[in-house]
Image (tube, rainbow, N blue to C red):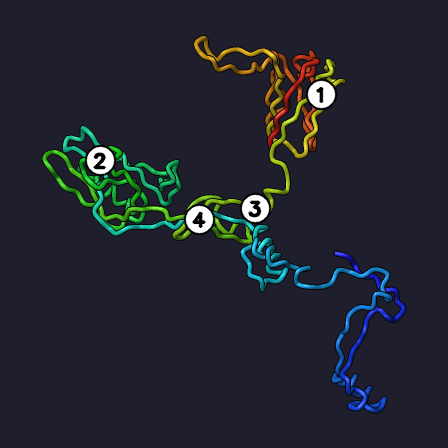
Amino acid sequence: MTDGIIKGSGNSRYLRSVANALSLYPTYTSFIQALAAGTFPIDLNGLNANGWSQQGTKLAKAALLKDATAALYGKSASAVPDDILAFIGQYNKYWWKRRAIQKGASRSIYICVTSQNNSYGQSCKYSSTIKIGGTKEPEMAEPTSSVVAYFSSAVSVLNVLVGKYFHGFIEKSDIGGNRYYSAYYGVGSVKKTIENTAAYFSMNAQKVTLGEPDYVSSSDANAYPESGVVGDYYYEAIGKPLEFFDYERSVVFNYRGTGTYGINNPTVLTFPFDPNLVIVSRISSNFSPVDSSSSLYIAGWRQGFIWVRGMSGTNSAGKLVSITSEEKTLKFWSDTAEAQSNDTSKYCVTAFR
């Protein structure tokens, strides 16, 4: 957009009134009275180019928010610029992905089995909360094990499962196996059923599943947990989406060693951020097969080191590399150019924030 610059000559704009203005306000007094009352009729009749050193961009809907731009944000043609700013601003909040904890109908679920002579039994894991496992299904979070060791005391031991999450089985023949192995929420007292020399333990419980994810946000970073259950939802923190674009999180670059070494000739690497992990590797032209029967070749890592924030030294070519770190900078030295990763070879640096 272009700013308008008025010459200050008193002629930047035109005014237009009604055709009968003189008969409506025939005297100067009536004219002034109408102006003071805000009833004198006028139109702003455009700009006089002669009164401007530079005419600015005309204020219009298309100059402020085009319909096509509003559509990019899912907004209608009636949207105003503040609607777009509000839409963007929500991504400067903290966001969480959450999934509803869904509990099915109550039914009898088998927990474990013991023998009359205590020759076998099963450890039952339970927890006050759940997490999402590798299969995206609910699992026990920080489970506690309750071992059913004695036939007579099993019921009292297992009653701890009431109001807790646990793994259970639909059929008693599946106890200890993986078939129908699911997460359940205990809602009734433990019962035992004796068959021959074995006692099977069961209780009324609800199968637990997790719903499809949705998202919530808050200006408070502690509104929901980093991960875990609050109420009827399981939460996973995402962070502030806008921060994802504020800075680099990794960087890769090369450097050519100078052949110098020692505390008075340190190698200094500078990064666009404070690194937490740095990998320095000497680029080798030597290639060797993974094994004698393989056609897959890998590049040899002849020399280098790995540094993690907080380390003051590491080994390279069997020698100690002394390392110091300052803001966005890593400085290191050793007693040979090779150990210092500074001989005249080419080196690759990979750093992570």
Q: CA–CA distance between discs 2 and 1?
A: 62 Å
Which residue type does callout 2 highlight?
A: Ile
Q: Which of marks 4 and 3 is in front?
A: 3
Give the residue number, with chain letter if any, for mark 3. 241
Q: Are marks 1 and 3 in contact (CB under 8 Å)?
A: no
SS of the residue under disc 2 = loop
Q: Are marks 4 and 3 in contact (CB under 8 Å)?
A: no
SS of the residue under disc 1 = strand
Q: CA–CA distance between discs 4 and 2?
A: 32 Å
Q: CA–CA distance between discs 1 and 4?
A: 47 Å
Task: Classify 100 as above or below 113.
Answer: below
Give the residue number, with chain letter if any, for mark 2. 175
Tell which circle, 4 or 3, labels the residue nearer the N-terminal end: 4
Give the residue number, with chain letter if any, for mark 4. 98
The residue depicted at 86 percent of the width and 61 percent of the height is: 53
The residue depicted at 78 percent of the width and 60 percent of the height is: 56
Give the residue number, with chain letter if any, for mark 1. 267
